[in-house]
Image: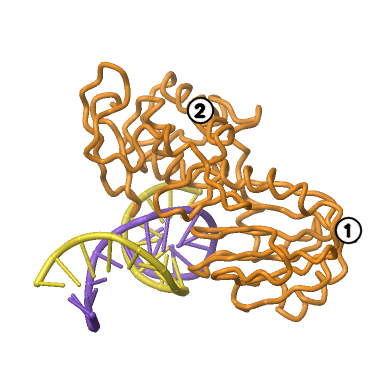
Chain colours: A orange, B yellow, C purple
Amino acid sequence: MPELPEVETIRLRLRPLLVGRTVVRAHVRRPDIIGFPSVAGFRRGIAGRNVAGLERRGKYLVVRLDRGMNLVVHLRLSGHLEVVGGYEEVRYERVRFELDNGKAFSFAEPRVLGRVYLVQRDKYPRALAGMMSMGPEPIHADFDAAYLGARLRGRTTPVKNLLLDQRIACGVGNIYSDEALFRAGIRPLRRAGRLAKVEVGRLARALTDVLTDGIKWCGTTLGDGRYRLPDGGAGSFQKRLAVFGREGERCRRRGCDGVVRRQRIGGRSTHFCPVCQR
DNA sequence: CTTGTGTCCTGTAGGC
DNA sequence: TGCCTACAGGACACAA
């Protein structure tokens, strides 16, 4: 479940391994992983491309190539990226990029929901429309209480649902939305348009802070180990989670004797402290 | 436009 | 032991 902090961590770790390298050829093990263009077009287009840099937009990782091309990767639920030895096999590997130094850049994903796209910069296909309509990065200055308030105004859906809407705040997923609502002291089921101004302010701040903390601690590696750093290591934000995955456990706020509850909201399992969050 | 629901996909956990 | 079902969840299609 890579969200913004996990993708950012992956970006920072992969950068020194990929920048300056040339992709010799791509091996597509599962054709449905290629979101754009055709598999043949993808293989043809990626061969010989040099990696100029790594960027991130929301949960998308963008590998900037020469000739105005971008390799866009979305890990969805269980995607994993790593650089391995040329003869090293990778479990659940879907696409492998042979590099000019004898190593390979591997995209693995058990569930086959993730996608990779090879696109011309400034000419994104329909398949990436979601990326184009994405809202601001919640860790940047253009995301603030005024912006969030404007986007929540008049909305009757639970605030939790809107935090997962990438058009409002990109990069937020199930873990960090629960954590942000806890920090802001807001119940996930509250109708978004009914939040008081001070609550919206707290929420905007909490989102920025929790995502920044997530990056600082290299993301959240849960027990299932689905998210791992490119070198196989684990993040450590899971040790700092206040509510996510802590159903039935005592609230972590000092002096609070609340017990963390779990509830399905918008088809997602949602965690909150009934004492701290109102 | 907004809101809610179903689907994609596969591994894993739990019940019996 | 093995079969079956529910669940995990990001994005998107679709209906109302």
Location of residue A218 (image quadrant): top right
- Image location (x, y in percent) of residue A38: 71, 78
For the C terminus of chain A, the quadrant is top left
Which residue is drawn at the image coordinates 63% and 64% (left, top)?
A: A107
Label 1 sits on residue:
A66
Q: Which mark is residue A84?
A: none
Farthest top residue? A255
Label 2 sits on residue:
A204
Which residue is drawn at the image coordinates 39% and 50% (left, top)?
A: A223
- Image location (x, y in percent) of residue C13: 50, 69
Type of residue at label 1?
Answer: Asp
Q: Distance between the residues labelled 2 and 1?
A: 37 Å
Which residue is drawn at the image coordinates 82% and 61% (left, top)?
A: A69
Location of residue A121 (image quadrant): bottom right
Which residue is drawn at the image coordinates 73% and 65% (left, top)?
A: A104
> Quick check: A228 above or below A148?
below
Q: Which badge, 2 or 1, is on the more N-terminal residue? A: 1
